[in-house]
Image: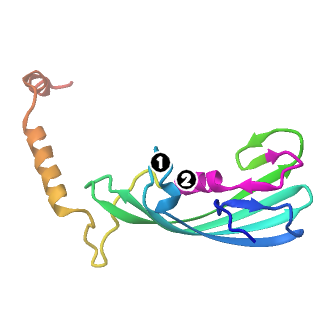
Amino acid sequence: MKKLSNPYLIQFAGLKTGEHKFFYVIDDAFFKDRKYSEIQQAHINTEVNLINEPHLLVFDIKMEGTINVLCDRCGDPFDFPVWGEQKLIVSLTNDKFEEDDIVSMPFESSEIDISQHLYEYVTLLLPQRRIHPDTKDGKNGCNQDALKRLENFSKETEKKTDPRWDALKNIKQN
């Protein structure tokens, strides 16, 4: 059997009806060709459980690992732990449609490339706010140097006020 150049290309035509498991490690190489990806470094263990039925493919995808992100507070990179589950349903039909996690493919299809779906699922694992977790002793995990600089900068901006606003502070409301 020849090795496929794309490990995310699943040939389902020759698979027996029933359950099949695939295991992947999504790492830096997975994101290398995605130029505008927010993610460039990761290590995510992925288990894909495929239930193959005559006109339907159901993918249960479980992911767990870390993604290297920049801290929103101090700007330093850190490994953010992620985990999640997704389901992808592929209907083999000649009618074209696509809704959220339900897609269609022509009835004659024999393979599916799940790499784009995996990429989207990994991206959805990222939180909106990314901040260093606290250390084991309960201290802030951020770069203390950067936090001190931010604090000094905020003190400087607090000291500078517009004299027009200062005059308004003297007005008393009845």
Q: Mark 2 points at which residue?
A: 124
Q: Is mark 1 on a helix, strand or loop?
A: loop
**Element class at badge 2:** helix
Q: Label 2 amino acid?
A: Leu
Residue nearest the observer in this picture, 100 or 8: 8
Query: Is residue 133 or residue 46 the one in the foreground?
Result: 46
Rendered location of residue 98, percent (x, y): 76, 41
Left or right: residue 108 versus residue 111 is: right
Q: Residue at x 28, y 53 (%)?
A: 73
Apparent side of residue 51 relative to residue 49 in the rendered image (left or right): right
Q: Work out whether mark 2 precedes mark 1 in sequence or the reverse, and give the earlier one.
A: 1
Question: Is 28 part of what is drawn in magenta?
Answer: no
The location of residue 152, given as percent across then percent down, is 10, 49
How many marks do you count on the picture? 2
* Range drawn in magenta: 104-125
- The amino acid type found where label 1 is placed reads Ser
The residue lying toward the viewer, choosing from 127 and 78, is 78
- Is label 2 in contact with label 1 (beta carbons under 8 Å)? no
Q: Residue at x 46, y 43 (%)?
A: 36
How would you rate the neighbour count of disc 2 (Cα within 10 Å): few for under 14, some for 14-19, many for 20 or more? few
Mark 1, residue position: 37
Q: Which residue is outermost to the front?
A: 2
Vertical position of residue 172 compared to residue 130: above or below: above
